[in-house]
Image (spheres, helix red, strand yellow):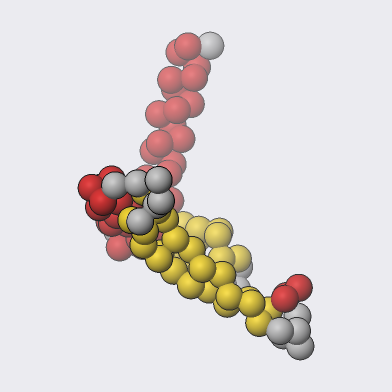
């Protein structure tokens, strides 16, 4: 049976070997399912996950920010986020002490 239900997710370009002197290659990302409803359900699930992405929410709630100068994946805690993190660490520490 042929897979007929597919969707392209994104396209990205990169230089071969990371050297801009080399030829550019294109990556094509996609998903496929045997039936259309499963594809639609998966796309809906992806869209819902984007709404609850911790990077997006943390930035919107002013808990942390990101800086390319420090590192793309390293969160820099803002005052509200640092307070929340401290409270969570205290709770975990107390729970750990109680349980041994």
Relative to 81, say whether 20 is above or below. Answer: below
For this orientation, the residue located farthest to the front is 1
Identity of the residue drawn at 42% across and 55% down: 31
Q: Is residue 72 left or right of residue 37?
A: right
Identity of the residue drawn at 26% across and 51% down: 36
Relative to 19, say whether 55 is above or below. Answer: above
The spot of residue 100 in percent (x, y) is 53, 11
Identity of the residue drawn at 71% across and 84% down: 23
The spot of residue 9 in percent (x, y) is 40, 64
Who is closer to the viewer here, 49 or 29?
29
Relative to 45, say whether 20 is above or below. Answer: below
Picture quarter containing residue 13?
A: bottom right
Who is closer to the viewer here, 59 or 29?
29
Q: Is residue 78 left or right of residue 69?
A: left
Identity of the residue drawn at 23% across and 47% down: 37
Q: Is residue 89 left or right of residue 47?
A: right
Which quadrant: the N terminus? top left
Picture quarter containing residue 8?
A: bottom left
Q: Is residue 49 visible?
A: no
The spot of residue 77 in percent (x, y) is 46, 57
Picture quarter containing residue 64?
A: bottom left
The spot of residue 14 in percent (x, y) is 63, 76
């Amino acid at each position: 049976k042929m897979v007929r239900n597919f969707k392209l997710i994104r396209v990205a370009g990169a230089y071969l070997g990371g050297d801009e002197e080399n030829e550019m290659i294109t990556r094509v990302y996609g998903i496929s399912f045997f039936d259309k409803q499963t594809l639609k359900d998966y796309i809906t699930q992806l869209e819902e996950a984007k709404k609850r992405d911790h990077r997006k929410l943390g930035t919107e709630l002013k808990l942390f920010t990101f800086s390319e100068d420090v590192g793309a994946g390293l969160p820099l805690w803002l005052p509200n986020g640092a307070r929340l993190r401290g409270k969570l660490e205290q709770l975990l520490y107390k729970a750990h002490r109680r349980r041994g």
